[in-house]
Image: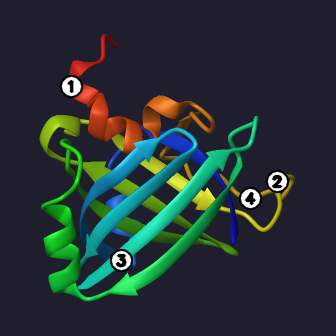
């Protein structure tokens, strides 16, 4: 239940033509404390409740527990969430032995596109696609829980 991933900015839309899957995600946070986040998510026609623990010092790993719930339960729980609902489309791209999840954000986070790759261990190597930009692993500004509180449109970039 430990998740190990690296996160990157995306520098072009080329990933869209490489994607084998595209899903709309709407999510909110019942609790977005830095020591724990409790997230409710609608992922296509599925609902999920997820608990995430604090990130490791290098930002590569963290505890994650997820349970599927009904869509109706997810919709009801979204009504109880803190302000700042996240709306995005997730594209999935397979490159050799890895799947990259690329999130294109909308609403208050429009203009932000972030890719994540999940790893089996922190030292695992992987091939980087040409559309992968600067690494932002461990930069809490790019955590969805933080984006719900301080959206991308409010940043001074």
Q: Nearer the viewer, mark 4 or mark 1?
A: 1
The answer to which of marks 4 and 3 sits earlier in the sequence is 3
Relative to 152, does residue 131 appear above or below in the rendering?
Answer: below
Q: Nearer the viewer, mark 1 or mark 3?
A: 3
Circle 1 residues within 10 Å: few <14, some 14–19, many ≥20: some
Give the CA separation, mark 2 to mark 3: 26 Å
Labels 2 & 4 near each other (Cβ < 8 A):
no
**Considering the image in quadrants, where does the C terminus appear?**
top left
For label 1, the residue is 153
Disc assigned to residue 48: 3
Q: Is residue 13 visible?
A: yes
Report the front residue among 30 and 61: 30
Q: Tag 2, which secondary structure? A: loop
For label 4, the residue is 126
In this image, 36 relative to 121: left or right?
A: left
Disc assigned to residue 122: 2
Relative to 56, does residue 30 appear above or below in the rendering?
Answer: below
Q: Tag 4, which secondary structure? A: loop
The answer to which of marks 1 and 2 sits earlier in the sequence is 2
Q: Nearer the viewer, mark 4 or mark 3?
A: 3
In this image, 17 relative to 85: left or right?
A: right
Disc assigned to residue 29: none
């Amino acid at each position: 239940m430990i998740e190990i991933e690296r996160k990157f900015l995306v520098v072009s839309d080329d990933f869209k033509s490489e994607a084998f899957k595209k899903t709309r995600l709407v999510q909110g946070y019942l609790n977005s404390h830095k020591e724990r986040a409790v997230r409710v998510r609608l992922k296509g026609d599925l609902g999920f409740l997820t608990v995430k623990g604090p990130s490791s010092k290098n930002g590569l790993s963290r505890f994650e527990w997820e349970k599927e719930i009904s869509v109706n339960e997810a919709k009801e729980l979204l009504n109880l969430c803190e302000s700042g609902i996240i709306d995005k489309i997730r594209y999935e791209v397979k490159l050799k032995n890895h799947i990259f999840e690329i999130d294109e954000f909308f609403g208050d986070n429009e203009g932000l596109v972030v890719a994540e790759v999940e790893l089996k261990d922190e030292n695992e190597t992987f091939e980087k696609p040409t559309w992968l930009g600067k690494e932002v692993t461990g930069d809490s500004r790019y955590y969805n829980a933080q984006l719900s509180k301080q959206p991308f449109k409010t940043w001074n970039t």
